[in-house]
Amino acid sequence: METISVAADSDGEAWSLFAVGDCYLEPGVRGDGPLFSPSLRKRATNSDIAVANIEAPIPEPGAEPVAKTGPTHRSDPVAPARMADAGFDVVTLANNPAIDWG
């Protein structure tokens, strides 16, 4: 378990939370450039805690999608690292596509 500490300039009683939802980093989203705008990255890194929700699961290599009607969504395996690089401290997965890949 990782401990999250309050920013050094915090007064100890107040803290900031920056939260975004439904980030979808589809397979193939790679490269060296930032995935998020400079203003979003600044908000994430300047907050005490930055939280993002990844819209789709990250299946194991070789996993097959479940049989269902409609599309199956998956995120690129680099998604968590790219979110951390953007300044996010916590990433959640709480969506209906979570079961698309078993």
Image (cartoon, grey):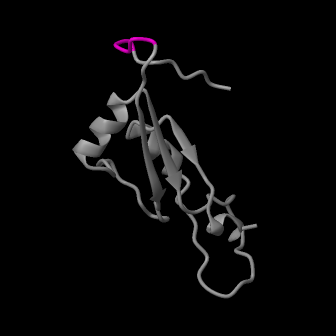
Question: Above or below — where is 67 with respect to 40?
Answer: below
Quarter of the view holding residue 91:
top right
User: Extreme front residue here?
Assistant: 13
In the displayed structure, does residue 34 sit left or right of residue 21?
left
Q: Is 62 in front, or is 50?
A: 50
Question: Above or below — where is 57 with respect to 11?
Answer: below
Tell me if residue 9 can be seen: yes
The residue drawn where x is 54% and y is 23% is: 4
Q: Where residue 57 sits: x, y (%)?
A: 62, 60
In the displayed structure, does residue 88 sit left or right of residue 36?
right
In the displayed structure, does residue 77 sit left or right of residue 59?
left
What span is in magenta?
Answer: 8-12
Q: In which quadrant of the rendered image does the C terminus lie?
A: bottom right
User: Extreme bottom residue here?
Assistant: 69
Assess whether residue 93 is covered by the magenta stretch.
Answer: no
Q: Is 82 in front, or is 56?
A: 56
Question: Above or below — where is 26 with respect to 92?
Answer: below
Quarter of the view holding residue 8:
top left
In the displayed structure, does residue 34 sit left or right of residue 67?
left
Q: Where residue 94 sits: x, y (%)?
A: 63, 56
